Image: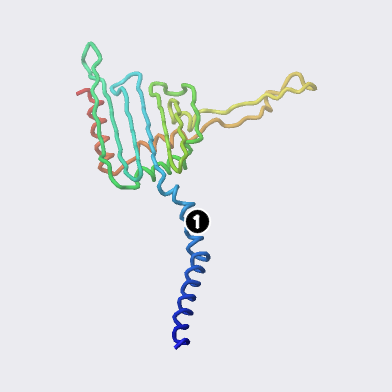
Amino acid sequence: MPRIRFIPTVIALVVVAVLVGGYFFYYGPEMARYNAVRPMAVSASDIKLGMLVSYDRGPLASEEYRLEDNNGNSTAFYRVTGRSLGTTSETLRSYTIIAPKSRTYTVPFFFDKLVQDGIWDVTNQPPRGDTNAHYTLSIEQSAQQQHGTRVVTFTDPHYWAVTAGRQYEIKLDKNKPVPDLLKLGSTSVADKRYEALVNDFRNFGTPEFQARVAQVRRQAASGH
């Protein structure tokens, strides 16, 4: 009889030992990893992207793309404002397209495309080329308890991509008071990123969204 009572006690001790060992060798490390990544999982993720094009003259006064994603809920917004024709005073007409919020990866994927094309790296540029249209690109991101924002302005992205020219450096030498202008070092200041980023916004969205944008743009430009 004493031996029979001893067996359950041994079994209970073995179970306790397995549980304790499992905690220290598996559950404990797993909980540590869980606690380490949990703040990242529950932290808010917010993306805001925009392009505003303002025109000094012509049938269009402005165009605006605004894209947002908040914790996986994406939406897209486009507005075009046209100038009415044949009037003594300027009248503005605006047309807006709003894509309802949806659980898609469209805006996050577009965000990655803009980052790849250099939106965090481009800088403001002075008016050059065709200065009728003024571009303002904006990006704002909040994720993993970090925040970043950037706004860039420029004109004529094609000019900056192709015809911006070269920048020359004159290095003075005390032994050669008159520099040889035929041997000046130069670097290209052309930057394709400006045109690529503008094209990214122009090509954003589903075929249906792009078709609607083209439709209201034509309507705004017609002056009716």
Looking at the image, residue 70 sits to the left or right of residue 28; the answer is: left
Q: Residue at x 47, y 69 (%)?
A: 19
32, above or below 93, in the image: below
- Left or right, 167 with reference to 132: right
x%, y% of residue 131?
A: 42, 21
**Image position, residue 6 (x, y; %):** 47, 83
> Among all residues in the image, which is located at the extreme bottom?
1
Q: Quadrant of the C terminus?
A: top left
Q: Is residue 95 left or right of residue 201?
A: left
Q: Residue at x 48, y 32 (%)?
A: 162
Q: Which residue is mark 1?
A: 32
Task: Give the side of residue 147 with respect to residue 172, left or right.
Answer: left
Q: Quadrant of the N terminus?
A: bottom left
- Mark 1 element type: helix
The amino acid type of the residue labelled 1 equals Ala
**Along the viewing direction, whichever of 110 and 150 lies nearer the viewer:** 150
**Percent position of residue 143, x then y:** 44, 42
Q: Residue at x 25, y 34 (%)?
A: 97
